[in-house]
Image: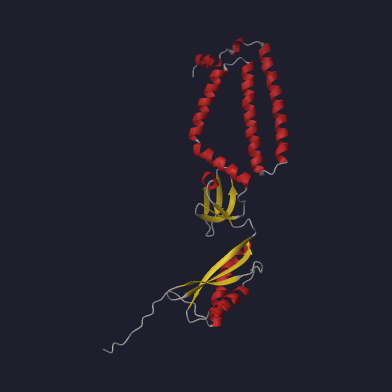
Amino acid sequence: MSALDLNALLGTSFVGMTVGEILSALLTLIVCLIVIKAVLKLTGRLLSRSKLDARVQKYIQTGIKLVLYIITVVIVAERLDVNMTSLVALLSVGSLGITLAAEDILGNVAGGLVILSSHPFSIGDFIEASGVSGTVQEISLNHTKVMTPDGLLVMLPNKELSGSKVINYTVLGRRRVTRKVTASYEASTEDVKAACRDALANTPKVLEDPAPAVYLSNYGESSIEYTVFCWCNAADYWDVYFGLGENLRTAFAQKGVEMTYDHLNVHIVENKG
């Protein structure tokens, strides 16, 4: 933009300004800065008494500061007889262009604020969302980092995460472990359940309340399915899950119960005709 166009935009020539106008604008700026400092101090006290996340408080403070500085620029510009209509129009066009270009980013930021304020999960929680399961490593404004059980770091966009179904396995402090096993039709139901109860008793970190349970859950083509339920602390889930799986195999062998697998029985009938 040329100097002539700039003067036309501002509606004034700074060369012709008087000392009084400059001092008046400077005094206005000082007053505005004092007011901004007071408002930010008051806002900080109010936010510190709230239950909002510390990062949300920081973002709110930053947003308020930005708005106050913009208002200050407008007030001081008016004191300098700047043509505010043209300036506001220019800022509006620029803001619209930035908004359209950063639509996804702004959506993620809004989602991040929703997550930080509503606390559906915290760092260290094991969650399942958008088809991904893992431990939350970091929550930022744009993305949430999740570490999967197989060691993969997944970055989930907050815009998608805030609008999807989220399962938090850690928030209640305990998790239910479910294991399914099969046994042959020849094995009695009580013998199979006794083997499952022995496996539970030999698995460390299983909670007594709620009590573990064993149920006959399904009749298959060549085997009967049993489901074993137990509870543990959220941090002990994988130890209990894999430990119970190993102890079930051992307990079945000790009880003489056959742990079946998919197979086909062929019966040969002699043709006496």
Residue lying furthest front: 273
In front of the other: 3 or 229:
229
- At horizontal 70% and vertical 34% (from top left) the residue drawn is 43
Q: Position of residue 156 (x, y in %)?
A: 52, 48
Compared with 129, 22 (above or below) is above
Q: Position of residue 26 (x, y in %)?
A: 68, 19
- At horizontal 60% and vertical 68% (from top left) the residue drawn is 230
Q: Position of residue 33 (x, y in %)?
A: 69, 26
Compared with 44, 211 (above or below) is below
Q: Position of residue 45 (x, y in %)?
A: 73, 37
In which quadrant of the rendered image does the C terminus lie? Answer: bottom left
Quarter of the view holding residue 147: bottom right
- For the question of whether residue 174 can be seen, the reply is yes
Quarter of the view holding residue 37: top right
Compared with 164, 90 (above or below) is above
Compared with 131, 187 (above or below) is below
- At horizontal 52% and vertical 14% (from top left) the residue drawn is 8
Give left or right: position of 211 versus 3. right
Residue lying furthest bottom: 272
In front of the other: 222 or 136:
222
- For the question of whether residue 202 can be seen, the reply is no
Residue lying furthest left: 273
Quarter of the view holding residue 76: top right
- At horizontal 53% and vertical 25% (from top left) the residue drawn is 92
